[in-house]
Amino acid sequence: MLDSATKKYATISGHRIFVVDDDPALLRLVNDRLDHAGFEVMTAASGQIALDLIEQHGLPHLAIIDIMMPGMTGFELCKRIQQYSDLPIILLTAIDQEDTVIHGLEHFAEDYITKPFSPRELVARVRRVLRRIGDFTYALDRLMHVDEYLTVDFVHQQAITDKTPVSLTPLETKLLYILMRNAGRTTTTDFLLRRLWPMEEVFEDVLRVHVHRLRQKIEMNPSKPHYVVTKRGEGYTFPART
């Protein structure tokens, strides 16, 4: 299953869905149903396998992650991934407990679904989340090529500017991910504050500091930014893919 999923992930364009669960039968079921619905699908039976595949192929458009897995739990995997991205996540849980669901939604997930579930319902939830976040206009490869000057490696938290690697902090990487996911549209200041610091009260001046530091690292001329452009009174934009 892993080899065919990896091949599909690398060769077909479209929305890429990553499913992580230690139940082989569930992986087959979800893989078949999402594939039939027109999505690219990659599966992993553990959190570590998931991280290894992201290391090889880059981030998907959305992940479906089981909470209760041996070794690395679903919450631990979510935390690792969202240190450097704002990857939309749907949690799978066999635990219909309010505290578990609330914790997942507050910290990691766009949605959740309780086992056993209807495959049709899961597909509907996937489509709803993808509609809500909008299209990611740049190709989600391991190295995301923006133009001749800028390439981004989210997994390794690195920008490559004029062929020179530049290290990014986890927060700078996540900020850049959100801006690129919304390329061509204005990402509001309030939205960035909520996504970057979901459990903290952080004010706009702190965001400005991180924007300034990101510009120093990725812009050819930070005083006249091309990639992270301020929309006064609204937020920031990243150029759409041409």
Image (tube, rainbow, N blue to C red):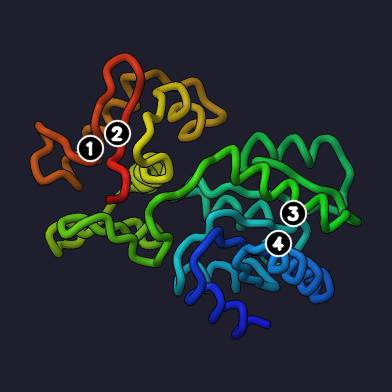
- Label 1 belongs to which residue? 213
Dot 2 amino acid type: His
Identity of the residue furthest to the top in this view = 233
Q: Earlier in the sequence, mark 3 or mark 2?
A: 3
**Tag nearer the camera, 1 or 4:** 4
- The local crowd at label 2, few if under 14, some if 14 to 19, many if 20 or more residues have their Cα within 10 Å, is some
Tell me how far mark 3 sits from mark 1, CA to CA: 39 Å
The answer to whether residue 50 shows anywhere in this view is: yes
Q: Amino acid at mark 4?
A: Ala
The answer to whether one can see residue 70 in this image is no
Residue shown at 70% from the left, 62% from the top = 37
Task: Select label 4 or label 3 by which is in front.
Answer: 4
Amino acid at the residue labelled 3: Val
Find the distance from the CA under tag 2 to the CA under tag 4. Answer: 40 Å
Are the residues at dot 4 and dot 3 in contact (C-beta closer than 8 Å)? yes
Which residue is labeled 3 in the image?
123
Q: Which residue is mark 2?
A: 210
**At label 1, which amino acid type do we have?**
Arg
The residue at the point 65 percent across, 34 percent down is 106
Disc 4/disc 3 C-alpha distance (Å):
7 Å
* In the image: residue 182, left or right of residue 1: left
Kindly identify which numbered label has been placed on residue 37.
4
Q: Residue at x 54, y 40 (%)?
A: 133
Query: Label 1 to label 2, Cα distance in Å?
Result: 5 Å
